[in-house]
Image (spheres, rainbow, N blue to C red):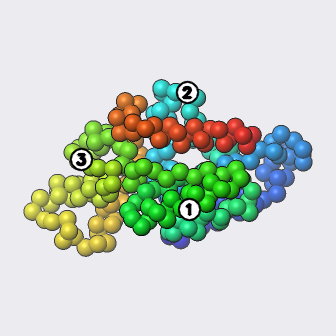
Amino acid sequence: MAKRANLIHRILKALRRPPSTLASGRGALQPHSAAHRNRPVLVVLEGHHDIQFLQRAAAVLRLDDNKLPELSNLERCGQIVFVPFCGDVRGWAFRLAELGRPEFHLYDREDTPATEVRLEMARVVNLRIGCRAEVMSKRSLENYLHPDAILEARGIDVRFSDGDDVADRVAEQCYLRNHPDDRWIDLPARSRRRLRNRVKSWLNTLTVERMTVARFAERNLAGEIRGWLQIIAEMTDSAS
C-alpha cells in the first residue's frame, strides 16, 4: 500500500512541475511551443496488473490493426501516464482534476453493489470535459483471457465465466495440483491472498503474451479492448 501511495505521489509531483522543468536536452520549452501544448493523457487503472495486461494486449491486437496505439511507446514518449490506484473508486472521480490533463478511466465490474458504484463514478467522469470512463462488461481483465492461453502459460486447465474471480480460481488449481489431499478453503485467508497475487502477476504478463488476435476475439466478441485502445488513441491525438 505504501509503495503504491508513493508511486501516485511521484506521478502527481511530476505532472505538477512547470513546463520549463519538463524540457528536453535542447533546453527549456518555450511558452508557446508545440511541445508545451502537449498534455499527457492520464490512464487511470485499478492497479499495476491492469497496466501489464493492457500494454501486452495492445501489442497483440496491433498485429491485426496497426492503427491501435502502442501503449508502451506512448508511455515512453510521455504521451500517456499510467495512474494505478487501489481502494475506493469514488475517491478518483475528481482526484486528478486539478492537473488539467485528459483522463481515461477503466474500472473493473466486480459484484453488486461495487458494480453500481463503478457505473455511477464512470458517469461522473464522463461529465467532465476531456475525460472518458469505461466499466468492463466482465468482472476484471483476467476474465478476457482465453483458457488455452492459461494452459500454455502454466499448465492450468480452468474454465470460468465472465463473473468469476479468475485469479482465485487459477490459484486454487495451482494449490491443489501440489496439495491434492488438501482443501483450498481450509488454507488461511492470508495464504490464499498471497497465492492469488502471485497468480495475478503471471496471468497479466505471461498469459497475455500467449493470447492471439483470434483468442481475444473469441473471449471478447464485442471488441471492448479494441474500443478502449481506440479511445486512448483518440485522446492522445487530441491532446497533441
How far apart are the alpha carbons under marks 2 and 3? 31 Å
Q: Give 111 or 181, whichever is nearer the viewer.
A: 111
Amino acid type, callout 3: Arg
Residue at 48% across, 41% down: 225
Amino acid type, callout 1: Met
How far apart are the alpha carbons under marks 1 and 2? 32 Å
Q: Dot 3: what SS?
A: loop
Indicate left or right for 4 with 223 as reference. Answer: right
In terms of sequence position, does the residue under pointer 1 or pointer 3 come before the other?
1
In terms of sequence position, does the residue under pointer 1 or pointer 2 come before the other?
2
Residue marked by disc 3: 159
How far apart are the alpha carbons under marks 1 and 3? 31 Å
Residue at 62% across, 38% down: 233
Indicate left or right for 11 with 186 as reference. Answer: right
Q: Residues within 10 Å of mark 3 (few under 14, many from 20)?
A: few
- The percent position of residue 124, horizontal first and vertical second, equals 61, 60
Q: Residues within 10 Å of mark 1 (few under 14, many from 20)?
A: many
> Looking at the rendering, which quadrant does residue 168 occupy?
bottom left
Q: Give 237 or 174, whichever is nearer the viewer.
A: 237
